[in-house]
Image (cartoon, rainbow, N blue to C red):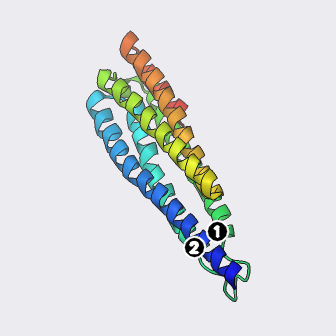
Amino acid sequence: RGSSLKQNEKKDLRYRAVQKVTLVGVVVNIVLALAQIIGGFIAQSQALIADGFHTLSDLITDFVVLVAAKLANKAPDEDHPYGHERIETIATVILGLALGGVGIGIALSAVDRLQNPEKLLQPGLLAVLLAIMAIVFKEGLYRYTHSVGKKVNSSLLKANAMHHRSDAVSSVMVAIGVGASVLFSIPWLDALAAMAVA
């Protein structure tokens, strides 16, 4: 009975850690997505707008993490005598599928713009600054989430951390594409950067 109590305490601490980290991610992603999408329209950068919607999609996956963590924390019952931990695995697969769907949407939009040059936008310096800001925030989220995921041994948090890292890498692509587009006044570089995000 004592070891079972200790195990429940450990599960509760783990759940609270997952919840806290994910809620921090939700707040950062909301602020960042708004800055990227609004800034992308103002600075005329398709790549930044695409990255903003990518960040917005992270909110969905953050909520998947929150729900999965809550359900996985439930005590064993008659239907699940070994507990509900496998829900984390299912949620990890959902994260991957969501990311794939967003990538396809961004790629299709970028291809459309490349095939129709009149739809191409010429981004401004603001787009580069916002892309750099996104890299800093997303890499920070990766380090924080991965550190807590390791500490509480949560595969779900580690998967979400890798999601943040892939976001940081896509923002690096945006910064390079948008920066080159601004520097050389070549609008299709911005569309190529949007494809890199995909």
Which residue is at the far front?
2
Helix, strand or loop status at disc 1: helix
Q: Is residue 144 left or right of residue 85?
A: left
31 or 83: nearer the viewer:
83
Front-most of 96 and 106? 96
The residue positioned 50% from the left and 65% from the top of the image is: 16
Q: Disc 1 versus disc 2: distance between alpha carbons?
A: 7 Å
Q: Is residue 95 visible?
A: yes
Quadrant that contains the C terminus? top right
Q: Secondary structure at mark 2?
A: helix
Determine crowd level at label 1: few under 14, some 14-19, many 20+ residues with C-alpha closer than 10 A. Answer: some
Residue 67, given in percent of the width and then of the height, sits at 52, 68
Position of 44 relative to 143 (above/below): above
In the picture of the structure, the residue carrying the numbered disc 1 is 87
Q: Is residue 131 left or right of residue 156?
A: left
Is 39 situated left or right of 95 in this image? left
Q: Position of residue 196 (x, y in %)?
A: 54, 30
Q: Which mark is residue 71?
A: 2
Left/right of residue 9 with respect to residue 3 in the rendered view = left
x, y percentage for residue 177? Answer: 46, 22
Quarter-of-image position of residue 191: top left
Residue at image point 37% right, 52% down: 27
**Dot 2: within a 10 Å radius of its alpha carbon, few (fewer than 14), some, or many (20 or more) residues?**
some
Q: Is residue 190 above or below residue 74?
A: above
